[in-house]
Image (cartoon, grey):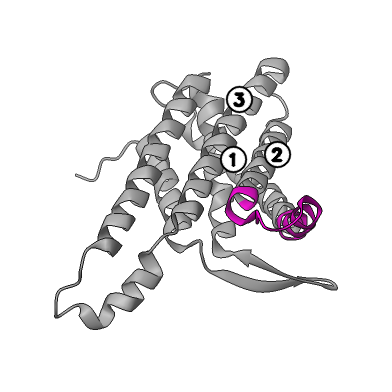
Amino acid sequence: MFNVKKLDVLLSLYVGFIVMSELMGAKTFPFSLGPLHLNATVAIFVLPFVYAINDIITELYGKRRAQSVVRSSLLVVAVLILFSLLATMLPASHRFAPQEPAYRAIFGVSIRIALSSLAAFALSEFTDVLIFAKLRQKLGKRNLWLRTNVSNFVSEFLDTAVFMTLAFYALHVSLGANVSFLASIATPYWLLRCAMSILETPLVYAGVRWLKGTEGAIE
């Protein structure tokens, strides 16, 4: 009765993590690294899983299948953004009016932030797949930990740099001031994402073992 294919479960989690990061990622929380007092988005807990699943799919099903998954996820993000704009623009009924300000605060999106997120996500996800696939061609099945983390570090750097620049670059401020500000918020955030990627490397191994032998998997 409850018969679900393993790959379908993984893809569902992949889309779910992306939706979580888009809907709930605006919240930031404080944390400390020694003398450094920083802030990070709650999406830091789900984004590494997105890259890990990317690597699992590329490892077992090849670059083309992984790229198809990325394109499908971009469609999901685009539809989510468009629906969020529609839902918050429509007038509220009399019964819902008291909740309308909270609804807009939670689900309302800035066009600039939304497009920045979409552009950064697209570039980083395709980069992750390409780098991982190239490393697999050169290294074969060896050093999965290395292939995973190298591709993740580079793609997560692009994601962070592109999003921060597109979302927060101020045209009325000098280039030097912009670079200094963006580096101050992007660098610790990227390093934290790299640390999360390292911690979740065992999950990539577990995912590959779990899916090995399924239909379409490359042996």
Q: Which residue is mark 1?
A: 204
**Rendering quarter of residue 12:** top left
Image position, residue 101 (x, y; %): 33, 77
The furthest residue to the bottom: 98
Above or below: residue 13 compared with residue 211: below
Badge 3 crowding class, 10 Å Cα cut-off, few under 14, some 14 to 19, many 20 or more, is some
Q: Residue at x 70, y 72 (%)?
A: 31
Q: Which residue is mark 2?
A: 149
Three-letter amino acid code at disc 1?
Val
Q: Residue at x 48, y 28 (%)?
A: 66
Above or below: residue 40 compared with residue 18: below
Q: Residue at x 48, y 23 (%)?
A: 61
Mark 1 against mark 2, which lies toward the viewer? 2
Image position, residue 146 (x, y; %): 74, 34
Residue 148 part of the magenta segment: no
**Rendering quarter of residue 208:** top right
| In front of the other: 93 or 176 | 176
Badge 1 crowding class, 10 Å Cα cut-off, few under 14, some 14 to 19, many 20 or more, is many
Circles 1 and 2: CB atoms closer than 8 Å: no
Task: Measure how far apart labels 3 and 1 are at the Cα level.
Answer: 17 Å
Q: Which residue is mark 3?
A: 130
Task: Measure how far apart labels 1 and 2 are at the Cα level.
Answer: 10 Å
Circle 3 sits in a helix, a strand or a loop, which is it?
helix
Q: Residue at x 28, y 76 (%)?
A: 100
159 displayed left or right of 54: right
Residue range highlighted in magenta: 164-187
Three-letter amino acid code at disc 3?
Leu
Three-letter amino acid code at disc 2?
Asn
